[in-house]
Amino acid sequence: MPRPERTRVFVVANQKGGVGKTTSTVNIAAALAQLGQRVLVIDLDPQGNASTALSVDHRRGTPSTYDALVDGVPLADVVSPSPDLDGLFVVPATIDLAGAEIELVSVVAREGRLKKAISGHPWVGTAAEAGDERFDYVLVDCPPSLGLLTLNALVAGEEMLIPIQAEYYALEGLGQLLETVEMVRAHLNPALEVSTILITMYDARTRLAAGVADEVREHFGNQVLRTAIPRSVRVSEAPSYGQTVMTYDPGSPGALSYLEAAREITGRAATRRGGSA
Ligand code: ADP
Ligand code: MG
């Protein structure tokens, strides 16, 4: 699997909770690592669910996203390797991050803190800048809101991955998310692009899920990955073992789908406005 020419930063966001942001972040990250890519997950949700799934400590006091965002600690000082997979690294989130939403309000350039932290990491950039140790992918797992934390992610990334749960209210609230993206693109980050939509918790037995998937594909066209992630108990029980489904049950339909989704992502060169992929 060829590596991208420079680090691709993905923001995984949807202000709705429970749509599969965290599950998709950790499993796509793990799948990319299994495909030989070097991957950094930044946990930007105070709940720390991505940290748990990747088996990285996130008790209070652990060096974390909070330190990088609020105190300007270099990102390299708060990164830990995920124990189960080579090439997979995590910046964990502690519960302190819940306060950052408010603490950041009075900080200078408050919406650009994460961007600064990421671009300051020596392993972020082109092959020429960062060498073979560079991260190929950075995935930012956002909290379920459109506050300052998510805004920081939207300013920091160039590509957005929106997980959409295949259920009745799937498209509700997406308008607000896309308006926020437009606002960020107009004022803060012209490079931001909704590159990837992933349909999650797809239940092939129901007509409802098929209908929702059709609607999402009609609306977003080829931004939607061909692979949809099926609803599967193995996917949901993996975090309780401190694992992704990619290592917990690699042959299960959920794991195979995430692997396929990761392959699709590596195969899609980002078509960036005003820049090269
Ligand atoms: P978010 O980060 O958007 O809040 P999560 O990734 O935490 O959403 O997922 C919400 C819940 O749905 C979790 O309990 C998770 O285990 C479960 N879940 C996510 N994807 C699947 C799936 N494909 N099959 C079964 N359960 C899933
Ligand atoms: Mg989450």
Image (cartoon, grey):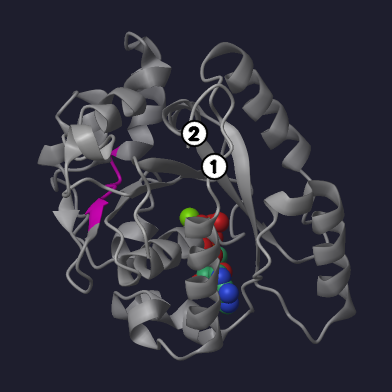
Instruction: Classify residue 228 by image quadrant.
Output: bottom right
Segment tinted magenta in the rendering: 89-96
Above or below, 70 relative to 211: above
Q: Position of residue 211 (x, y in %)?
A: 89, 68
Residue bearing mark 1: 270
Please provide percent x and percent y for residue 179.
72, 27
Q: Is residue 15 visible?
A: no
Report which residue position mark 2 lands on: 158
User: Tag 2's secondary structure?
Assistant: loop
Left or right: 33 as drawn, with respect to 61: right
Q: Is residue 95 magenta?
A: yes
* Location of the N terminus (image quadrant): bottom left
Q: Earlier in the sequence, mark 2 or mark 1?
A: 2
Q: Residue at x 48, y 80 (%)?
A: 255
Residue at image x 40%, y 88%?
249
Corner quadrant of residue 213:
bottom right
Q: Above or below — where is 239 with respect to 178? A: below
Which is more toward the observer, 144 or 223?
223
Is label 2 in contact with label 1 (beta carbons under 8 Å)? yes
- Of the residues shown, which amino acid type is indicated by label 1? Ala
